[in-house]
Amino acid sequence: MCFSRPCVLASALAVCAGVSLSAGQASAQVWNEVPDAPRLPPGQLTFGFGPLLEIRGELTGGLRGFQTDFEDVYCILITDPAAFSASTIGGANFDTQLWLFDSAGFGIVFNDNAVTPNGEVNQSRIINDQLQWFTEPGFYTLAISGYNTDAATGVNSPIWLDTPRNTQRAPDGPGAAGQLSAWNPGPDLNDEFGVYTIFLTGCEFCIPSAGAGWVIAAGLLASTASRRRRHG
């Protein structure tokens, strides 16, 4: 099995080449997870036109050690960094975690429990209204997992520490400098899962169409990732 960035990207593009833009995939400004989203970058490439307002999917869980689904990863195009937000508040009934990476899989910001006017909740929210996390528009990798499935560079190398849970944070774990290449389960192996909607602002679909547009966009995505690897 190949886990290198070029191999993962090539695999994703091969899948995309055979996928049509159907009602089951993109509808208006909504992306529906079809089939199961990958667990590593570049993630599921979203097709559509105009603003991407929602990503709808499901983490189905499963028995650890066998086929499991505790995390989903998506490619999105952020067009307005100052307006960008991602939230599962009102979109999930389980304890979620949201993770944002650049197109090469390097961590940018993470949130476990969002703080609302009514107090802390188990759902998650990322906002960039002060450009505090990133300033450039472009392709980004958005991931969702259930608590306590954590983004990592390898076994016992989480990109973020577990706490504090109720704030947005830049990478601060032992794997902070690395790319997303693994997910570490919680010690009790009872991580959360369920149906979710991620509400989005400031972004569009990763791929502008199911025709020639996706080839152009995919090339830009690969080029962006290559530049970040060379200069990161």
Image: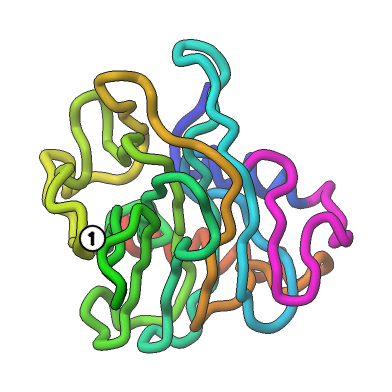
Counting from the top left corner in percent of width and height, residue 211 is at 83, 67
Asked where in the image residue 26 lies, by quadrant, the reply is bottom right
The residue lying toward the viewer, choosing from 54 and 155, is 54
Q: Residue at coordinates 27% horizontally, 36% vertically from top-left?
A: 153
Left or right of 29? Residue 82 is left
The residue lying toward the viewer, choosing from 194 and 22, is 194
| Mark 1 lies on residue | 232
Which colour style is shown? rainbow
Left or right of 147? Residue 31 is right
Q: Residue at coordinates 60% horizontally, 46% vertically from top-left?
A: 195
Q: Residues within 10 Å of mark 1 (few under 14, many from 20)?
A: few
Left or right of 163? Residue 134 is right
Counting from the top left corner in percent of width and height, residue 66 is at 53, 12
Q: Residue at coordinates 29% horizontally, 19% vertically from top-left?
A: 188
- Residue range in magenta is 17-36
What is the quadrant of the C terminus in the image?
Answer: bottom left
Asked where in the image residue 157 lies, by quadrant, the reply is top left
Q: Residue at coordinates 22% horizontally, 44% vertically from top-left?
A: 159
Q: Is residue 26 above or below residue 78?
A: above
Counting from the top left corner in percent of width and height, residue 183 is at 36, 33
Query: How many numbered marks, from 0 up?
Result: 1
Counting from the top left corner in percent of width and height, residue 160 is at 19, 47
Left or right of 226? Residue 199 is right
Q: Is residue 210 above or below residue 52?
A: above
SS at mark 1 in the image: loop
Three-letter residue code for mark 1: Gly
The residue lying toward the viewer, choosing from 211 and 46, is 46
The main secondary structure of the magenta stretch is: loop
Query: Residue 219 colored magenta?
Result: no
